[in-house]
């Protein structure tokens, strides 16, 4: 054992390694990404690790490994689970042989996601048991227990941290590589009565699953992480109130509780719910407040148990309006919730009336980002035309911000291409562009492109190829020719994929060359059918350009602000009445040089 | 002794390294450390923060009026985090504003002098760092985080020793970078 300062995601990865994981797969997505990266980085040498093309692929790879007796891990963010839900729903019916842990990182807030969906609810829906850690140290230990549990009951299990556990750091005790478990998989044993899902198998296994999950409510009542912290201090005698909580909220409750608190029930396995433990907690209480993020899972379970066991306890929470129904909890929100419930005086907020207006800092595309140039080129080419700019999920979603204002829709990974088709079927005179990143194209853009080509939709698919998965921290993907283990492999060519589908017009452009790009875009937009433009220019964070930096000749600058007002580049600032360039941010992309009407900006590397 | 510290600034300013070195220094003294920080989309030019608790605690997030120290890379961000500072807490902040793109195109104005004025009025222990001058004096544009961290550690409110921060720095950075970073750590002491 030794101590390390680890991110929650790193701790889960090291926990999985300590549990002897054999195969690990996943798709990047905040806040889950660092788990798989850490498995790759700290791989003792015999673990197979891959970035899968999407979450469904990752889930199926892990399932194949688990039915071969290996310990398998698959990681994703909560919306990724939607993509992987098809294999998951069926996998629960056939079960696994080796332990299989599905880490799904939930994102209360949401901080960097489209939805605030709750994987605990997904656990109930899919009948898959859920483990819910409260801290980094616990995540490290609990994921090892989750592997054992999965193997013992032949079911995949959810491991469901939230952002504050994923991205929190803590100095924790972990095992040395010499202490890791070694698992030697038996291999796949043919048995169609077991591994081939047919209605007959489903009928039999569904009944077994329901029986098992009911039995697990008793088993999990004995799991020491489902615990009741007895009332303390002035609440010790005769207090008939209690608090039920989970995950990071449990940690906030413990910090807020101090020395005086009522009984606290912490639920580590929200499904199957630890019924006996819960009933023991409820008995002797009159009122319970549930403090949890996302869905009222504990609240519903306690209300159900009060009915089932005829207990006269009032359960308060989201459904009674006692706490907020959405968004992230904080130490302060939890403190206020507890104070209100317990009838303690709430801390009054100090009025800070003289506080000056704070700067608003929405995230923006980086200085020199090639996406800015791609959006600007299409915007210029389509000036005055009736257009739709369908967006997608990635850094380029930031193309929605002013002054670019180039994202009219954004739904989920890959939806831009297919939604654009729906729009042009309603309004055929619209010039529809669907913007999608390279990694997202591989993850879920190809099917939509085939749909467009087959159904003859007049749209232009624009692939913003920056040769990396930038938003989640620069993971490789099939187009990069590199794997997570650093192997060099044959790259999948986006051009060949598009031509293979049948697209006749597939044009690759350099977005940083506006003079060439703009007329080409205009011409392609006028062609009928499904066409594609690939804007290829590497991410400037991943591949730092070696070009010179642009600078403004203030004598020539006429102070028209066109560069600032049209590009919104963070390196372009106003110095008095003239434009100026922050050299520490400029990458020399020279886009502003091409936009300046009087040629006052020079020095960038691109057109030299 | 337990300490609650907030590091804040704008994405890309190097708040993370300052926070990591402080954590490493605390661990050299066998203290328990937890942090919570901004990762992901918000890093792209957005407000970033790292909450750090040194000593025993259950959760890494700091509540209002619980921070002993705020180490800030940007005056507007200092004001944003100020509600977390204890009545008698300490603030170490750079006075150089980073203007958001939205301010440049006239969507949201930001008056940094008003921020400094507000801080002077509301913070008892305020250490203002003229980052432009410091970096000029040091002849290096990349060590602002070390100047601020050095000032914070020297204030005694970070709960770690300068020698442990230096040792942590040696473990993380290649030797040619040690001297300038150590000078930056000491800079505010000599002012």
Image: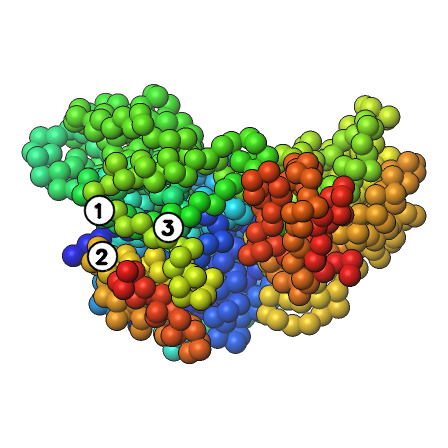
Whether residue A535 is visible here, answered yes or no, is: no
Q: Quadrant of residue A420?
A: top right
Of the numbered discs in the image, which one, if any, rests on residue B155? 2
Identify the residue under disc 3: B94
- Against B142, residue A230 (above or below) is above
Q: Residue at x 31, y 73 (%)?
A: B167
Farthest top residue in view: A320
Q: Residues within 10 Å of mark 2 (few under 14, many from 20)?
A: some
| Residue B167 can be seen in this image | yes
Q: Position of residue A253 (x, y in %)?
A: 25, 40
Q: How many marks?
A: 3
Q: Secondary structure at mark 1?
A: strand
The residue where tag 1 is placed is B125
Percent coordinates x, y for residue A96 in the rendering: 53, 56
The image shows residue A505, relative to residue A18, as above or below, that is above
Is disc 1 surrounded by few (<14), some (14 to 19) or many (20+) residues within 10 Å? some
Q: CA distance from mark 2 to mark 1?
A: 9 Å
List x then y, in percent, for residue B169: 36, 70
Horizontal arrangement in the rendering, residue A70 relative to residue A499 (left or right): left
**Mark earlier in primary sequence (2, 3):** 3
- Look at the numbered discs 2 and 1 and tell me whether their residues touch, using CB distance below 8 Å: yes
Mark-to-mark CA distance, 2 and 3? 15 Å
**Residue at image coords 92%, 48%:** A504
The answer to which quarter of the image holds residue B191 is bottom left
Marked residue nearer the N-terminal end (2 or 1): 1
């Amino acid at each position: 054992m030794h101590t390390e300062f680890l991110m929650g995601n790193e701790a889960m990865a090291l926990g999985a390694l300590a549990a002897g994981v054999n195969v690990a797969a996943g798709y990047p997505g905040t806040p889950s990404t660092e788990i798989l990266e850490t498995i790759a980085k700290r791989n003792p040498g015999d673990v197979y690790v891959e970035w899968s093309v999407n979450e469904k692929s990752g889930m199926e790879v892990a399932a194949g490994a688990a039915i071969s007796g290996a310990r398998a891990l698959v990681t994703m963010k909560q919306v990724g689970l939607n993509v992987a839900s098809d294999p998951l729903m069926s996998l629960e019916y056939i079960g696994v042989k080796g332990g299989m842990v599905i880490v799904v990182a939930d994102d209360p807030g949401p901080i960097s996601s489209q939805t605030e969906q709750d994987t605990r609810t997904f656990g109930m829906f899919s009948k898959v048991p859920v483990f819910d850690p409260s801290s980094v140290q616990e995540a490290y230990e609990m994921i090892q227990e989750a592997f054992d549990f999965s193997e013992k009951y032949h079911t995949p299990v959810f491991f469901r941290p939230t952002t504050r556990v994923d991205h929190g750091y803590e100095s924790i005790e972990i095992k040395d590589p010499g202490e890791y478990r070694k698992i030697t998989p038996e291999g796949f044993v043919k048995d169609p009565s077991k591994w081939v899902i047919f209605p007959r198998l489903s009928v039999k296994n569904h009944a077994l699953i329901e029986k098992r999950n009911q039995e697990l409510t008793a088993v999990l009542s004995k799991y020491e992480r489902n615990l009741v912290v007895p009332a303390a201090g002035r609440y010790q005698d005769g207090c008939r109130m209690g608090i039920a909580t989970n995950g990071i909220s449990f940690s906030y409750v413990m910090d807020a509780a101090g020395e005086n608190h009522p009984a606290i029930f912490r639920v580590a396995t929200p499904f199957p719910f630890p019924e006996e433990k819960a009933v023991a907690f409820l008995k002797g209480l009159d009122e319970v407040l549930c403090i949890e993020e996302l869905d009222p899972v504990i609240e519903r379970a306690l209300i159900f148990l009060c009915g089932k066991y005829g207990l006269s306890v009032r359960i308060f929470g989201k459904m009674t309006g006692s706490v907020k129904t959405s968004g992230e909890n904080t130490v302060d929100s939890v403190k206020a919730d507890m104070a209100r419930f317990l009838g303690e005086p709430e801390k009054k907020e100090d009025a800070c009336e003289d506080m000056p207006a704070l700067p608003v800092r929405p995230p923006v595309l980086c200085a020199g980002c090639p996406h800015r140039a791609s959006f600007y080129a299409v915007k210029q080419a389509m000036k005055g035309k009736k257009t739709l700019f369908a967006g997608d999920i990635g850094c380029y979603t930031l193309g929605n911000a002013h002054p670019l204002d180039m994202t009219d829709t954004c739904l989920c990974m890959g939806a831009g291409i297919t939604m654009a088709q729906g729009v042009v079927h309603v309004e055929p005179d619209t010039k529809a562009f669907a913007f999608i990143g390279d990694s997202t194209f591989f993850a879920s853009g190809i099917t939509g492109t085939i749909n467009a080509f087959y159904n003859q939709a007049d749209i232009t698919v624009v692939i913003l190829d920056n040769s990396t998965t930038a938003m989640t921290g620069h993971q490789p993907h099939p187009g990069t020719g590199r794997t997570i283990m650093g192997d060099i492999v044959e790259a999948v060519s986006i051009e060949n994929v598009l031509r293979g589908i049948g697209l006749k017009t597939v044009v690759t452009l350099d977005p940083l060359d506006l003079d060439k790009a703009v007329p080409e875009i205009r011409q392609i937009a006028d062609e009928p059918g499904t066409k594609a433009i690939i804007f290829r220019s590497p991410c400037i964070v991943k591949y730092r350009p070696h070009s010179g930096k642009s600078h403004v000749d203030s004598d020539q600058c006429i102070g028209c602000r066109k560069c600032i007002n049209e590009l919104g580049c963070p390196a372009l600032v106003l110095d008095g009445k003239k434009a100026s360039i922050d050299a520490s941010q400029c990458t020399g992309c020279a886009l502003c040089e091409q936009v300046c009407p009087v040629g006052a900006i020079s020095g960038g590397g691109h057109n030299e | 002794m337990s300490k609650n510290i907030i590091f804040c600034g704008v994405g890309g300013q190097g708040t993370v390294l300052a926070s990591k070195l402080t954590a490493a220094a605390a661990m050299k003294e066998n203290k328990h450390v937890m942090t919570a920080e901004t990762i992901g989309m918000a890093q792209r030019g957005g407000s970033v923060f790292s909450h750090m608790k040194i000593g025993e605690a259950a959760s890494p997030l700091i509540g209002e009026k619980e921070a002993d120290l705020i180490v800030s890379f940007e005056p507007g961000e200092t004001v944003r985090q100020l509600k977390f500072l204890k009545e008698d807490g300490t603030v170490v902040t750079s006075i150089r504003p980073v203007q958001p793109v939205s301010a440049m195109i006239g969507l949201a104005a930001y008056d940094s002098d008003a921020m400094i004025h507000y801080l002077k009025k509301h913070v008892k222990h305020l250490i203002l760092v003229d980052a432009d001058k410091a970096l000029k004096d040091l002849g290096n544009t990349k060590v602002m985080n070390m100047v601020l961290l050095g000032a914070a550690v020297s204030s005694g409110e970070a709960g770690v020793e300068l020698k442990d921060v230096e040792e942590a720095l040696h473990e993380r950075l290649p030797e040619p970078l040690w001297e300038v970073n150590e000078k930056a750590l000491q800079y505010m002491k000599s002012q």
